[in-house]
Image: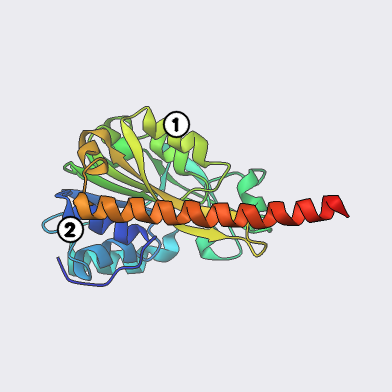
Amino acid sequence: MTEIQLATGQFITTLAILIQNGVRYATSIDLGSADGNFNLALMHNYGFLPGATCVNVDANALYEPSLREIQRVAGGHYLIAGISDHDGEIELQMGMHSYWASLQPPDDPYWVIPGYPPTKSTKVRAVTLDTLVQEFALKPPFLLKLDLQGGELAALRGGEKMLAQTDTVICESAPDQFPAVCEYLNSRNLGLFDLTQISRKPDGSLMEFYPVFLNRRLDHIKYKDQMGPEGIRALIAAMEQRRNAILEQNARMLSRLRTKASQ
């Protein structure tokens, strides 16, 4: 793996932690791939996917030239299609920027987020994750990333068989969507491992983030003690220092309240 400094709080860093703990993938699938940077960077900048097959999927044909060139030079597969809970056809709503295109209908709350309604729509092929795996004869274990502008849960519902063989899921989520996504993945043996790339609105409130889920057969990574005796001692000392600081702050506030009450 290439030695690169990675920033805390990024899903790339979380993937690095998993790689360092022995997690390996036979296939990496990026849903809502746009120009395909995620898989290309994982394979060739970071060296995270040795021997893996990369699959890029996006419903917007705008990205096909980029994805075709990645396939030609780097291998793997690409597909221009909408990933949903059924095979067939589906409407792709186009936003004011190509990144905002979504399979969510015009009356869906998703369109409140950019603050603008879709500009037009076009019919695209709809496929499920299970169909995608079958069509390209993809091999597990899988790494799955979803960035589908509100369509993440529908895509996951179409991957019942595939999710059973998936080790890691990275899923863009907004606060209102997260509980349903979390519940669904938990019921498929994928538990929350990390919260990454938290972004906020101009007023500071939560806008979106990328939770990372890990298959429970890898739960030993969650509970692995990497601190050691010295680390535990340092943690306890830090907690005592924090408590003392809180007690001092409480004392100052209570002193001011007593003074105010006596006036």
Q: Nearer the viewer, residue 206 or 90?
A: 206
The residue at which mark 2 appears reads as: 49
Residue 22, image x and y in percent? 14, 49
Q: Secondary structure at mark 2?
A: loop
- Residue 50: image x %, image y %? 12, 59
Residue type at mark 2 is: Leu
- Is label 2 in contact with label 1 (beta carbons under 8 Å)? no
**Considering depth in this image, is 136 or 144 the residue closer to the camera?**
144
Residue underneath mark 1: 183
Q: Is residue 35 left or right of residue 46?
A: right
Q: Quadrant of residue 249?
A: bottom right
Task: Please report the residue visible at 24 percent of the width from the left and 63 percent of the height from the top.
Answer: 42
In terms of image quadrants, where is residue 217?
Answer: top left
Q: Amino acid at mark 1?
A: Glu
Q: Is residue 133 above or below residue 38?
A: above
Q: Is residue 70 left or right of residue 204?
A: left
Q: Residues within 10 Å of mark 2 (few under 14, many from 20)?
A: many
Residue 226 badge: none
